[in-house]
Image (spheres, rainbow, N blue to C red):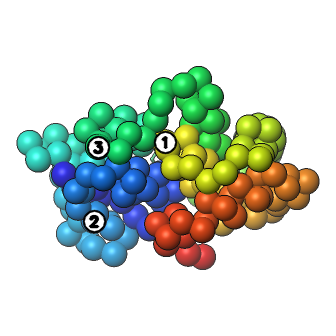
Amino acid sequence: MKLLHAHNSPYGRRALLAARFSGLDIQELDVSKDPEARSVLVAAGPSAKIPGLLLDDGTCLCETLIIGRHIDALAPNKLTDHSPEQLEIEGIASVLMDAIYKRSKERLAEDGVPSPTVLKTETDRINRCHDALEARLSGQSAAFNLATIAAVSALGYANWRGADDNWRKGRDGLSAWYDAMMQNKDVAESAPVF
Ligand SMILES: N[C@@H](CCC(=O)N[C@@H](CS)C(=O)NCC(=O)O)C(=O)O
């Protein structure tokens, strides 16, 4: 199996961490550093989005949630207990990531005029997600599953593309949880560089 990711993609980071924590032997190809890997991604399926998981039979899985499920299904080290608590956090982190991504695209609108409605809708959603993660992850110790991988990746992305939200402010429990997660070598190494 080959994982096509890009260092600064938060979706790619989730798949990368799932691959690393799974105990499976998954080859990592960073399409931001390797033009050949980008061609593989584009040729492998219609999505051409990061991440992609290229299976040995040529099937290319797209969508981070699907890729995480497939890795977990094969993994010696299971990545989810399928509990409502973990699923809820994974969903909230997915929504947070999508909202930051959508807002940053809007800020770079081709006509130079971002929609105030989109900016407000997504910023409100981002703040609600940060509050929800504070409520759920405060006081938790570092643990590595699909939910916590999604949350740490979304918050790492927020540090970069959502710095003005200042997510740590008033969220001491979430800040402490994030800092504990970042003690892990793979989590730290995969943080976006900006
Ligand atoms: N829903 C997708 C989103 C993936 C995504 O949008 N990835 C970005 C990189 S952060 C991408 O490849 N964008 C290129 C594009 O939209 O063409 C997932 O969960 O995997």
> Mark 3 near mark 2, Cβ–Cβ under 8 Å?
no
Q: Mark 2 sits on what residue? A: 29
Residue 159 picture location, percent across and down? 69, 64
> Mark 3 near mark 1, Cβ–Cβ under 8 Å?
no
Spatial CA distance of label 3 from label 1 is 14 Å
Please indicate, yes or no, whether residue 146 appears anywhere in the rendered image. Answer: yes
Residue 92 picture location, percent across and down? 64, 36
The kind of residue tagged 1 is Leu
Spatial CA distance of label 1 from label 2 is 21 Å
Q: Mark 3 sits on what residue? A: 76
Q: Nearer the viewer, residue 160 or 101?
A: 160
Q: Residues within 10 Å of mark 3 (few under 14, many from 20)?
A: few
Q: Tell me the element at label 3.
A: loop
The kind of residue tagged 2 is Leu
Instruction: Note whether ligand 1 is within 8 Å of mark 2.
Output: no
Q: Residues within 10 Å of mark 1 (few under 14, many from 20)?
A: many
The kind of residue tagged 3 is Pro
Please tell me whether residue 31 is drawn above or below residue 16 in the rendered image: below
